[in-house]
Image (cartoon, helix red, strand yellow):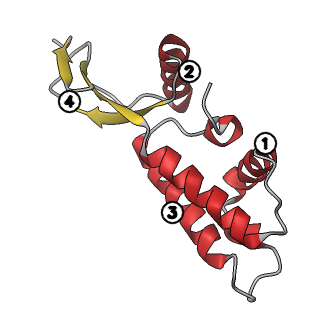
Amino acid sequence: MNKYTSLFRSVTTVEESKDLIMQLEELSGSLFSKKSKDVFDNLQLSIKNEVEIAIKEQDAEITDATKLQELLNSMIEYIQGLSVLSLTLAVSPTSKQLHEMSDWLERSTGKKILLNIMVDHTVIAGAKIQYNGVYKNYSL
């Protein structure tokens, strides 16, 4: 299981991880600003609760801005260090399919792996997979 379980429940792709990093960086940058009463106001509603839960899971004191900033930076570093599996398919997978693939990868490997999904309409069936420098073409 990964270090920030709650935070990664909804993050399956490289694109989603980049969006999360951007939001965490904005949150980290706003900690010492006096413009906002609630530092979490700038987060998208879809991840606001997950970030708050992840912070509580790490026993971080939300009132201490310096410690919170260190925790946010740790989350960003963790995301940036995740492995990526590139998958080329004929069509875009649904959100449900992405989550199923992500869950299966995590169960199978014991770690969180981000999906980099590419669509290639010349692929009739199957998939092209690249992970850890190994490339396999199972497409038609």
Q: Which-is-in-front pick, marks 4 and 1?
A: 1
* Residue at left offset 85%, top offset 69%: 63
Q: Amino acid at mark 1?
A: Glu
Q: Which residue is mark 2?
A: 103
Query: How far is the residue under mark 2 from the one under mark 3?
Result: 24 Å
Q: Which residue is mark 3?
A: 22
Q: Is residue 37 visible?
A: yes
Q: Amino acid at mark 2?
A: Asp
Name the secondary structure under disc 2: helix
Quarter of the image that includes the N terminus: top right
* Residue at left offset 52%, top offset 54%: 76
Name the secondary structure under disc 3: helix
Q: Amino acid at mark 4?
A: His
Query: How far is the residue under mark 2 from the one under mark 1?
Result: 21 Å
Contact between marks 2 and 3 (CB within 8 A): the answer is no
Q: Which residue is mark 4?
A: 121
Q: Which residue is mark 1?
A: 57
